[in-house]
Image: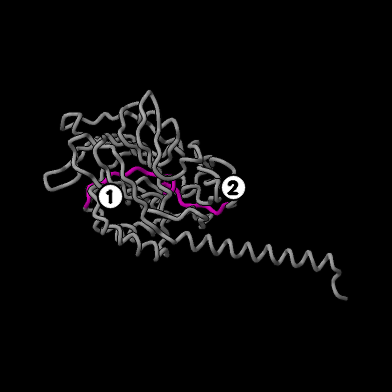
Amino acid sequence: MAPSRPVRAALTAGAAAAGLGAAGAAWGLAEASAYRISRHTVPALPADAAPLRVLHLSDIHLLPFHRRKLAWLQTLADLEPDLVVNTGDNIASDHSIAPLLDALGRLLDVPGVFVPGSNDYFAPKPANPFRYFAGPSKPLKHQPRRLQTEDLFRAFRSRGWVDLTNRSATLTAGGDGAAVEILAGGTDDPHLGFDDWRGFTAPTRAPREQILTLGVTHAPYRRVLDAMVADGADLVLAGHTHGGQVCLPFYGALVTNCDLPRAQASGLSSWTAAGRTVPLEVSAGIGAAPAMPVRVACRPEAVVLDLVPRA
């Protein structure tokens, strides 16, 4: 017996919905590897400082079979940055450490700073991808397997990158007699509650007016941004949000996975605290959560910040 008209209509609607779902998933998977370079010019330097190019890397979430991502990472040294800032969530497997270091290659010879994200510490676990849209996730009662985090960070430090995990440090970047003195401070991952902001406490080697004061954190929670700006940051960099990962036209990011306003889920904006307003740049990140490896209207990115003197 042939199906009735209502049954045929329901079957047709179901097939159409399935087709749209499949097309959406295919689009999301394709966009997750449509890597781009985002560029911003930021007036954050003292009046007499030479321009400084910063390459911001965040949320790589590397698995060893991400060959296209690895090949793209290998091209980033051609951007010739003066400073690399890595805001965490580099890996999703212990087996990703060696491929990541190889892909970063010449960037590890450039002055750099880094802070951890949660996925540098813990291996991902299978999860309902729709939980991503339920608001900021909470630390698990039973943490997943620990990754060999220290192997990765030891390699970064051995190549000269400065570890800003709940500490500050001074370094110089730039060349040809135009180096900029940088006072940088960072935190451990605020999303896990590991942050312990101690201020910009490192001793300086130059007069204050010749220094860029840089705040670096993985997850841009308001408490951390407020503290960094109040303590004198000239610029704050963060990641974690994935730019929302799934965005809608005319609406933008659905979530930020922290208490940052949705409108600031990615890109260059500003943050005000204690009467000071400074540039805030939040990277949409290079990877995606392994439990939800798609992006919609939110391409993965590395960010180039060309810092210039303030007017």
- Residue drawn at (52%, 46%), measured in percent from left and top? 252
* Residue at numbered disc 2: 131
* Residue at numbered disc 1: 156
* Rendering coords of residue 36 (x, y %): 39, 57
Q: Secondary structure at mark 2?
A: helix
Q: Most prominent secondary structure in the magenta stretch?
A: loop
Q: Residue furthest bottom?
A: 1
* Rendering coords of residue 98 (x, y %): 32, 59
Q: Which is nearer the eye, 147 or 238?
A: 238
Q: Residue 80 falls in which quadrant of the image?
A: bottom left
* Rendering coords of residue 122 (x, y %): 45, 48
Q: Which mark is residue 109?
A: none
Q: Which is nearer the eye, 177 or 41?
A: 41
Is residue 62 on the magenta stretch? Answer: no
- Residue drawn at (28%, 30%), measured in percent from left and top? 200
Colour scheme: one colour
Magenta residues? 110-127
Residue 169 seen anywhere in this rendered image of the structure: no
Q: Tell me the distance, in whole angstroms, between the alpha carbons under discs 1 and 2.
A: 33 Å
Q: Secondary structure at mark 1?
A: helix
Which quadrant: the C terminus? top left
Q: Amino acid at mark 2?
A: Arg
| Classed neighbour count for the residue bearing mark 2: other residues with Cα under 10 Å, few (<14), some (14–19), many (≥20) | few
Q: Residue furthest right?
A: 1
